Image (cartoon, rainbow, N blue to C red):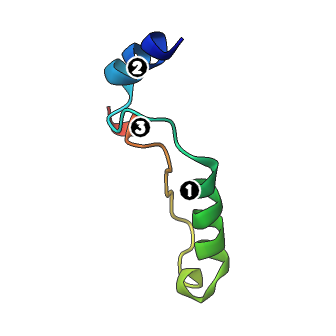
Amino acid sequence: MDAATREYLASRQPSRRFVATESVGAMAAFLCGPAGQDITGAALPIDGGWSVA
């Protein structure tokens, strides 16, 4: 299982790891806080580079 996961990620995911749920939560907290108040209509992918690979 570990070898298959490494092989899959090596060919498709530039960061070579799955995105942690904590990273998604951190982005949500950021966007809900004062620092995110002026971010509107923006796409902020949290995908470890998947969308540009």
**Left/right of residue 49 with respect to residue 18 in the rendered view:** left
SS type, badge 3? helix
- Observer-nearest residue: 40 or 26? 26
- Observer-nearest residue: 42 or 26? 26
Callout 2: 10 Å neighbours few (<14), some, many (20+)?
few
Q: Which residue position is annotated with label 1?
A: 23
SS type, badge 1? helix
- Residue 17 vertical position relative to residue 45 in the rendered view, above or below: above
Residue at x-position 64% and y-position 83%: 33
List x then y, in percent, for residue 26: 59, 65
List x then y, in percent, for residue 49: 37, 41
Q: Which residue position is annotated with label 2?
A: 6
- Residue 41 vertical position relative to residue 48 in the rendered view, above or below: below
N-terminal of the two: label 1 or label 3?
1
N-terminal of the two: label 2 or label 3?
2
Q: Which mark is residue 51?
A: 3
- Residue 18 vertical position relative to residue 25 in the rendered view, above or below: above
SS type, badge 2? helix
Residue located farthest toward the front when viewing the structure as drawn = 2
Q: Give the spatial CA distance, label 2 vs label 3.
A: 19 Å
List x then y, in percent, for residue 36: 56, 80
Q: Give the spatial CA distance, label 1 vs label 2.
A: 20 Å
Residue 23's quadrant in the figure? bottom right
N-terminal of the two: label 1 or label 2?
2
Residue 31's quadrant in the figure? bottom right
Nearest to viewer (mark 1 / mark 2): 2
